[in-house]
Image (tube, helix red, strand yellow):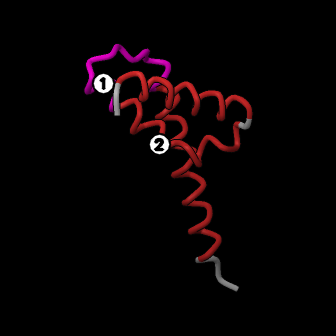
Amino acid sequence: MTTDQALNKVFSLLDRVQADPASGMACQAELSRAVAQLEQAEVSVPPALHDLCAKLAAERRAFEQQEADFDNMPI
């Protein structure tokens, strides 16, 4: 993926998260990969973008833990 493609991907994903915050968990891994590609291309990535990736990852882990807790709840 070229730098331009990675930037377009990041902006597209950010637009999706802004339009529908609930979709953040769904595109978290894709956003993290695009950010990593930008860093590999030595593009300066703002700390706020790293913070957003970390926040989305934490929300995803919390949701998955809630699902696991629910699945393991005694009947």
Q: Amino acid at mark 1?
A: Glu
- The tally of labels here is 2
Q: Amino acid at mark 2?
A: Glu
Considering only vertical position in the picture, is 49 above or below 31? above
Magenta residue check for 43: yes
The residue lying at 42 percent from left, 37 percent from top is 32
Q: Quadrant of residue 42?
A: top left
Q: Which residues are drawn in magenta?
A: 37-50
Magenta residue check for 39: yes
Which numbered tag is attached to residue 53? none
Which residue occupies the extreme right position in the image?
19
Neighbour class for label 2 at 10 Å: few (<14), some, many (≥20)? some
Residue 2 lies, in percent from the top left, at 34, 28
The residue lying at 45 percent from left, 23 percent from top is 7
Report the residue marked by disc 2. Answer: 30
Element type at mark 1: helix
Which residue occupies the extreme bottom position in the image?
75
Residue 17 lies, in percent from the top left, at 65, 34
Q: Quadrant of residue 19?
A: top right
Q: Which of the two residues, 69 or 9, is positioned nearer the viewer here?
A: 9
Considering only vertical position in the picture, is 37 above or below 44? below
Neighbour class for label 1 at 10 Å: few (<14), some, many (≥20)? few
Give the position of the N terminus as an image quadrant.
top left
Report the residue marked by disc 1. Answer: 39
